[in-house]
């Protein structure tokens, strides 16, 4: 366990410590991760409100990934200032007593004052879930996307694998994305059919899992990539057309961006010496309320 690092004081004189939180959330009813003027219904807004209620006048919020509206997480990492008097083993319990049920702190650990989940992260893993089903299941509607057309397993898995490598992805992002670096390396890209996991056969709604691992992603990039994979899997786009588009830094017109509800930030990895959760948890991990697979953290 890291020793608490003082980062200042509240107006009431409470010393503050820097704390890393491992957080999961159902993003359906939130306007995304980042604070927005005129609403506290963002993940950042609700977590900062909880920190203030515990006595932190200056939360200093930093997250590993700025998830969009409707996007979920099982492995989001956040750094925040909390009163030093809170024992590490009680931080998750204290935060969860204030946060809405749709946001849970799975684990908390004191960290260095210079720890930045955004800068110190070396890999992020996103998982997109999609079921082949005519009618949307009310039990999965918040976390799994649905398509009424079947995906050809061979075409779909080959399309996902095509994304592994280094690509110019300027056209694979939202129009409002301001990222300056668009030539990115995708370390892992896989499409896992329901048949790839024996446990999935027991699910009432078996679903595909599209897994992407990279140091960073552009705004809407994963949802565009899934859209292209689905287009190939359903025969609307040829695999060679997708490969040519990637080589040319283009985005095919025969595809669409898939909806947010299927997307989940599953895991964040840090360089040696920067992972605040290397020690055994002092208070146990929370049980996930989101669909989980072998790919989840």
Image: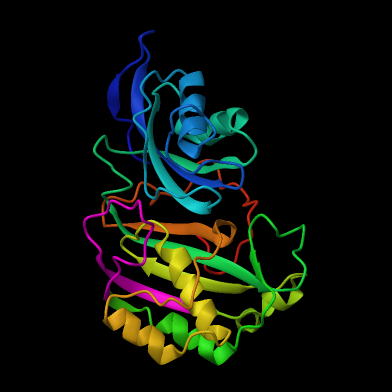
Q: Nearer the viewer, residue 86 or 66?
A: 66
Q: In the visual, does 88 lie left or right of 173? A: right
Q: In the visual, does 16 lie left or right of 25? A: left
Q: In the visual, does 283 lie left or right of 7? A: right
Residue at figure coordinates x 36%, y 46% from the top left? 276
Residue at figure coordinates x 28%, y 42% from the top left? 115
Q: Position of residue 113 (x, y in %)?
A: 26, 34
Q: Where is residue 233 in the image (x, y as percent from the top left)?
A: 55, 84
Q: Where is residue 164 in the image (x, y as percent from the top left)?
A: 35, 79
Q: Quadrant of residue 243?
A: bottom left
Verify whether residue 151 appears in magenta: no
Asked if residue 230 is positioned above or below residue 216 in the image, the reply reads: below
Asked if residue 243 is positioned above or below residue 180 in the image, the reply reads: below
Q: In the visual, does 291 lie left or right of 105? A: right
Number of marks: 0
Residue at figure coordinates x 45%, y 84% from the top left? 159
Q: Quadrant of residue 8?
A: top left
Residue at figure coordinates x 52%, y 52% from the top left? 73
Highlighted range, magenta: 167-191
Residue lying furthest front: 253
Color theme of the render: rainbow
Can residue 256 be seen here? The reply is yes
Q: Which of 285 and 104 is in front in this view?
A: 104
Q: Nearer the viewer, residue 114 or 57?
A: 57
Q: In which quarter of the image is the N terminus?
A: top left
Q: In which quarter of the image is residue 218?
A: bottom left
Can residue 54 be seen here? The reply is no
Verify whether residue 171 appears in magenta: yes
Q: Nearer the viewer, residue 84 or 193?
A: 193
Q: Position of residue 197 (x, y in %)?
A: 63, 79
């Amino acid at each position: 366990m890291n020793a608490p690092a003082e980062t200042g004081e509240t107006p009431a004189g409470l010393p503050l410590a820097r704390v890393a939180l491992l957080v999961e959330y159902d993003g359906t009813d939130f306007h995304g991760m980042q604070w927005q003027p005129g609403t506290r219904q963002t993940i950042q807004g609700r977590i900062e409100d909880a920190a203030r209620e515990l006595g932190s006048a200056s939360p200093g919020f930093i997250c590993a990934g700025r998830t969009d509206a409707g996007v979920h997480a099982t492995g989001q990492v956040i750094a925040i200032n909390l009163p030093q008097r809170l024992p590490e083993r009680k931080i998750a319990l204290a935060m969860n007593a204030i946060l809405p049920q749709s946001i849970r702190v799975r684990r908390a650990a004191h960290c260095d004052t210079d720890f930045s989940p955004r800068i110190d992260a070396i890999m992020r893993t996103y998982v997109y879930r999609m079921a082949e089903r005519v009618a949307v299941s009310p039990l999965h509607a918040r976390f799994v996307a649905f398509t009424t057309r079947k995906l050809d397993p061979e075409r779909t898995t080959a399309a996902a694998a095509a994304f592994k490598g280094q690509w110019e992805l300027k056209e694979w992002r939202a129009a409002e994305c301001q990222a300056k670096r668009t030539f990115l390396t995708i370390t892992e890209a896989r499409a896992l059919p329901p048949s790839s996991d024996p446990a999935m056969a027991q699910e009432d709604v078996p679903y595909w899992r599209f897994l992407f691992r990279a140091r960073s992603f552009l705004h809407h990039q994963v949802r565009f990539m899934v859209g292209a994979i689905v287009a190939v899997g359903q025969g609307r786009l040829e695999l060679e057309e997708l490969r040519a588009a990637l080589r040319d830094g283009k985005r095919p017109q025969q595809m669409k961006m898939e909806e947010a509800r299927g997307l989940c930030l599953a895991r964040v990895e840090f360089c040696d010496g920067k992972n605040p959760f290397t020690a055994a948890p002092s208070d146990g991990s929370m049980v996930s309320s989101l669909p989980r697979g072998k790919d989840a953290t």
